[in-house]
Image (cartoon, rainbow, N blue to C red):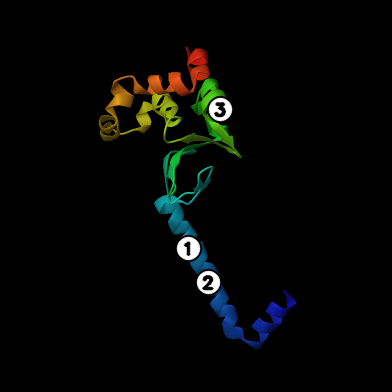
Amino acid sequence: MQAVARGLQARPYLGRAIVSIVVAVIVWGQREKEVGAKMLTPWGASDFSKQLVPGVYSVSTPSHGGYMVGAKVAETFLSQAARLFVGERWGSWYAFEEDCAWTVIGLEHPELFSEEDKQRNRFYFYEGGQRTVLERYYPQYIRQAS
């Protein structure tokens, strides 16, 4: 640290360059929050995230994705059965992967999905697919939620 300080005193122009870099990183970080902040997920670092409502995010990574729900939000946003039997606790989040676990989000909060999303996923939203998936992969959820 002292060597850095001596180097900056000997070359004041470096101090300005470092400040510029720090400001650029801060501005870039703010831009990322506005367009889809990167998040750490159980599936790796997200390359895209979208806040659906405060504390609830749709995320994707290069290999997988799903929904992340903040633990405090989940207490009121999701049923106890969803938290206990479907969501994977991951630090201060509950993670619901995109293959099967996401269906509990769609079942408990269909308002988060646009009509276009629902039409594109008719089986899940209009033909009982969410319940079918949950019965097969998360039977404890169905037993407690019923």
Residue at left 53%, top 33%? 73
Q: Amino acid at mark 2?
A: Ile
Secondary element at tag 3: helix
Percent x, y of residue 31? 43, 58
Percent x, y of residue 106? 39, 28
Earlier sequence position, callout 3 versus callout 1? 1
Q: Which residue is mark 2?
A: 21
Task: Place residue 5 in its image quadrant.
Answer: bottom right
Q: Which mark, residue 27? A: 1
Graded by Cα atoms within 10 Å as few (under 14), some (14 to 19) or many (20 or more), the crowding at tag 1 reads few
Percent x, y of residue 46? 47, 49
Graded by Cα atoms within 10 Å as few (under 14), some (14 to 19) or many (20 or more), the crowding at tag 3 reads few
Q: Residue furthest right?
A: 2
Q: Amino acid at mark 1?
A: Val
Q: Which mark, residue 124? A: none
Q: Amino acid at mark 3?
A: Glu
Residue at left 52%, top 73%? 20
Q: Which residue is mark 3?
A: 75
Secondary element at tag 1: helix
Earlier sequence position, callout 2 versus callout 1? 2
